Amino acid sequence: MMAAADKGEAAMAQLRNADPALFLSPSADLAAAAREASQHIYSSLVTFSPAQPPPLPSLLAGPAFDAEQIWSQIELLARPLLPHLRRQLRRLEQQPPSQPQAAPRVESPAGAEEEQSEEDEEDSELEELKEEEEELEDSDDEDEMAEDDEEDEEELEDKGGNGVEDKFLKTKHLEEFLEQAEEEEYGGGAKRGEKKAKKNWMEEDSDDDDEGMEDDEDDEEDEDELDLEDFEDDEEEDEGKTGGDIMYKDFFEKESKQVKSRDSSMKKVQSRLKDMKMILMAVKMMMMMVMMMMMMMSEQDEQGLSTYEKERLKKRAEIEQMEKAVLEPSTWTMQGEVTASRRPKNSALEVDLDFEHNVRPAPIITEEVTASLEEMIKKRIAEGHYDDVEKPALLPTKAPKERKEMDESKSKKGLAELYEEDYAQKTGLAPAPLSISDELKKEANALFKRICLKLDALSHFHFAPKPVIEDMSIQANVPALAMEEIAPVAVSDAAMLAPEEIFDGKGDIKEDAELTQAERKRRRANKKRKYAESHKERPTKLQKDA
Amino acid sequence: MEVDRATTAAAAGGSSSSGAMAVDQASRRVEKPLFDALMPSEMSGGRPQFRKVAVPQHRFAPLKRCWMEIYTPVYEHMKVDIRMNLKARRVELKTRQDTPDVSNLQKCADFVHAFMLGFDIADAVALLRLDDLYVDSFEIKDVKTLRGEHLSRAIGRLSGKGGKTKFAIENSTRTRIVIADTKIHILGSFVNIKVARDSLCSLILGSPAGKVYSKLRAVSARLAERY
């Protein structure tokens, strides 16, 4: 037992004295030391566990045990132990300080003052805890910075104040120092704020747990630093007693109590609180060591390699992992063009596909839409503003070719005359002939004149009729009476003709059928005679000229 | 002037050697002898020249009718003697003393011949006035061998309804066409004759009148632009 305890002490000493830099790299010695130390602490704490006999009498921290396993063992002990300790502390405070020895060590002799504070304030238990921890801190301060305290006290005494003033200054000084340290470590008051918030609305037990958890977190972060100040800082943070949160009553009323407590049974309280604190510290240290072990044990196999080699191995492992990932076939979403046969069934439904919709979504026709459309249509119709496609006016690039119409009748002029006219035009003796356009112009002119005449007849007051142009006009061989006669329509033209107009001839008219032979012969002879007379002239002409 | 020329010509014919000797003597300066153009009467030894144009049966009556129109330009303007030989059924032409040009006789002969082919006097007179008018004749069988109804239809196609196709060609190409059964005569300048002949041939070969018209239109426009 003693040997084990010595071993444990030695291990703890070793850990404490070790260079913080050594903890960065895994070392078998430190790991073994940590195991020993944790075992020692466990054995020392197991007697205080509330459940007797304890579920696990000793910590099993052999080399075969994983950090997780060791941790869980410690947790098994610490979980019921911590709240138990705190409850005992409270009891100590409540109970009168008359029985300091008989009562368990954790009893607080400052119960009277606490009662007073309770009576006065009737606040939640949070404040009590704050006060407890303040006391603890105060004791710590006294332990470690005795000289400073004395100096402060002296200063305060010079000022002529009470013990209150001493207390006030000291706590303030402490708080400032702690704040500074915190800022250095954590870089701001964010964490503090969180912890404060947690504190405000959680119960004591949970607060305790949080404290423990927060402590662990701190331990994890600052593994290398085994400073006790960390614990103090944690306590300080848990309290929430920063510069801005401190109230008047906390200082003056408490300080008075504290002064009283100090006056009454300072030493006893000190010793008991010391022990309590030691126990708490031990628990925390154990937890921290376990964390260290976790770090070390994971790399126990590679003790013989240099840092470079270890890093190389790490990189190699990474590279292999990446190569494996690259070589194996990637998911179908990463394969570019994928047909339905290449991907699992209905897999496209699960993936959020993003593709461009080149089609405008169909417009939702509502009543408002139709109303607006109709309004627009009405407006357009009223304005007469249509979107009809208008043919652009073609500008004639060149004058329209004058096409000579193909004359399909016998030309009136002979070939010689044609050439004669051509020659005359070329030499300039005769004017150019009228082209088709000129004829058209002529026709147009004539039409226009006629229209003008009619308009003049309608509009002018003094109308002068156009001069009559005597034209050669064909007189139809129509009976004179027909030209001027006004006869009823029913009377036909045949009826209006005079007998002479119907037939001109003389004598007895006989049809060909009625004629006799002699008469027929006579007719023929007359005809021949007439023909002979008309054709007699020609041959004489020819003969004459020849 | 003419007597002198005659004497000098005789002298020249007689004494050519003396002229040569004269040339040889004046070797440094050579003078080319200048002769005036011969009168038609002096040509061929001062004897008149004749042309005879036969008159076909169907042109006899028209000739009789239009004799004066033929006679006047020939005798008055061309100064060529013209007479009708009824017995021989010929028109005879003879140069006179005062016929100005050698070609007049030929022109008059062409003129009369054109009339005999069937052309009008008004058209044939152009031959007298212009030098570069010709008469081109060809037969339908030269273009394509057609028989019976095809031949008749070809002739019908050539003339068209009321002769409108023929007139259309005539008017657009400035020629005159005579279709005498299977013979076709064209009177006009060389280029125009060619165009008319092409269109007539295409008609004989069977193309419709519309197609021929369109071609004619294009060609005639080109011809008109040129002149």
Image (cartoon, helix red, strand yellow):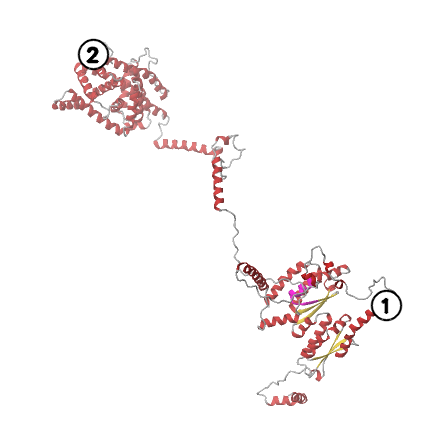
Tell me which corner region of the image, top left, top right, bottom left or bottom right, holds residue A17.
top left
Circle 1 packing at 10 Å, graded few (<14), some (14-19), many (20+), is few
Which mark identifies residue A521? Answer: 1
Q: Position of residue A25 (x, y in %)?
A: 32, 28
State the residue lying farthest toward the right.
Answer: A517
- Name which residue type carries label 2: Pro
Q: Position of residue A131 (x, y in %)?
A: 23, 19
Q: Quadrant of the C terminus of chain A?
A: bottom right
Front residue of B55 and A311: B55
Q: Nearer the viewer, mark 2 or mark 1?
A: 1
Report the residue marked by disc 2.
A97
On whether residue B170 falls in the magenta region, the answer is yes
Front residue of A202 and B193: B193
Q: Chain of mark 1?
A: A
Q: CA distance from mark 2 to mark 1?
A: 193 Å
Q: Chain of mark 2?
A: A
- Name which residue type carries label 1: Lys
- In the image, which residues are magenta? B163-177
Q: Position of residue A350 (x, y in %)?
A: 48, 30
Secondary structure of the residue carrying numbered label 1:
helix
Classify B99 as above or below A460.
below
